[in-house]
Amino acid sequence: MEEVSKLSVDQIRQVKDQVDGELSVLQDSVNNIRTAANRFEMAAKALQNLSQHPNGKKLLVPLTASLYVPGTLQDVEKVLIDVGTGYYIEKSVTDGKDYCDRKINFLKANHEKLMEVASEKRNVAEQVNMVLQAKLRQVMASK
């Protein structure tokens, strides 16, 4: 932080803006990871629920978050897993649940790492802000 205190007020503001921008991106990433983990947790619960229903059971199939169509279960032993970029893999319900659990664990590990980085970045932002405030006080006192 000693290097920052040697900068002009405008330069310190630029550093502050950059750090704030990086912090904002990190927060967005943390939120996206949390959302993705929640989706995989919901998918794992849905798979658990699906395995308890018999073939031929009538149900509503979600097309969107608010649009459902009637459907009938044909095979409760196999599911299609969206592995990204429009690719799907057929797996057993157990393998599908294992896939979701692996993804959840991976996302939670990344979430923890990002939280640490965000915390460090928050500390840097606070320090830069303190240096900026001190520099502004110094400029005002010299006028």
Image (cartoon, rainbow, N blue to C red):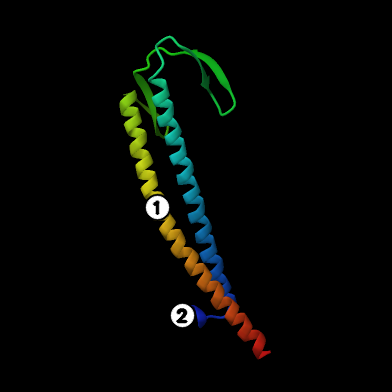
- Name the secondary structure under disc 2: helix
Q: Residue lying furthest bottom in this view?
A: 142
Circle 1 sits in a helix, a strand or a loop, which is it? Answer: helix
Quadrant housing residue 20:
bottom right
| Res. 79 image quadrant | top left
* Image coordinates for residue 143, horizontal then vertical, percent: 68, 89
User: Label 1 vs label 2: CA separation?
Assistant: 30 Å
Q: With respect to residue 137, does 86 lie above or below?
A: above
Specify whether 119 is left or right of 90: right
Return the residue found at the far top.
56
Kindly identify the amino acid type of the residue bearing the numbered disc 2: Glu
Q: Nearer the viewer, residue 34 or 45?
A: 45
Position in image of residue 3 (x %, y %): 46, 80
> Which one is nearer the viewer's eye here, 126 or 139?
126
Mark positioned earlier in the residue sequence (1 or 2): 2
- The answer to whether the residue labelled 1 contacts the one labelled 2, judged by CB atoms less than 8 Å apart, is no
Q: Amino acid at mark 1?
A: Glu
Label 2 belongs to which residue?
A: 3
Q: Residue at x 51, y 51 (%)?
A: 28
The circle on residue 112 is 1
Residue 99 x, y percent position in the rendering: 33, 33
Q: Tell me the crowding category of disc 1: few under 14, some 14 to 19, or many 20 or more residues within 10 angstroms, Cα based.
A: few
